[in-house]
Amino acid sequence: MCEIGLMCEREESLHGLNSIDPQLPQISVTFMTKPSLSKSRFMSGFQCHLRLWYETHARELASEPDDGLQAIFDTGHEVGELACKRHPGGHLIAHDHLHTDEALDETRRVLAAGTAPALFEPA
């Protein structure tokens, strides 16, 4: 059996809920390897600890960000785009928080090559 925060590389159904009330929908939870704290997750956790838990352990149950939080996310993306324009020739590590190992590998490769004057979103 998996513990929260450890990778099982499988989905588990919460069968116990259906034994309590057969009308409840079947829920699948995917456990992640090592949850990382992205800017988005930080803001979610700052807003509501339960929201952060859902986004980390049961994304399909998490609510969509409200207009205020979405505006913060949009501002973060705009700052990232401005940074890329300000430092031409830089290298964007375009892996999301669910692909940390790939982001680390690419970051190491680019640093070892020494060809990029700047790294954007490195791991």
Image: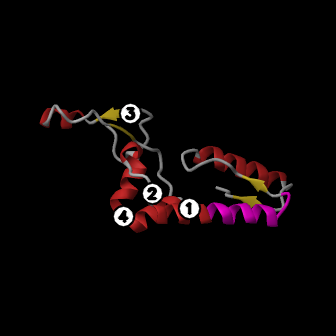
Q: Earlier in the sequence, mark 4 or mark 1?
A: 4
Amino acid type at circle 1 is: Phe
> Where is mark 3, residue-wise?
11
Tell me how far mark 4 sits from mark 2, CA to CA.
Answer: 11 Å
The magenta stretch spans which residues? 76-89
**Image mark for residue 73:** 1
Q: Earlier in the sequence, mark 4 or mark 2?
A: 4
**Image mark for residue 65:** 2
Specify whether residue 81 is painted magenta: yes
Tell me where residue 118 appears, x and y as whole percent.
79, 62
Q: Earlier in the sequence, mark 2 or mark 3?
A: 3
Q: Nearer the viewer, residue 56 or 1?
A: 56
Q: Single out the residue that lies furthest toward the left.
A: 20
**Labels 2 & 1 near each other (Cβ < 8 A):** yes
Quadrant that contains the N terminus: top left
Tell me how far mark 2 sits from mark 1, CA to CA.
Answer: 9 Å
**Labels 4 & 1 near each other (Cβ < 8 A):** no
Residue at point 69% right, 62% down? 80
Tell me where residue 40 appears, x and y as whole percent.
51, 59
Image position of 96 (left or right of 16):
right
Amino acid type at circle 4 is: Cys
Tell me where residue 120 appears, x and y as whole percent.
72, 59
Query: Does 26 sit above or below residue 75?
Result: above
Tell me how far mark 2 sits from mark 3, CA to CA.
Answer: 25 Å
Q: Earlier in the sequence, mark 4 or mark 3?
A: 3
Amino acid type at circle 2 is: Pro
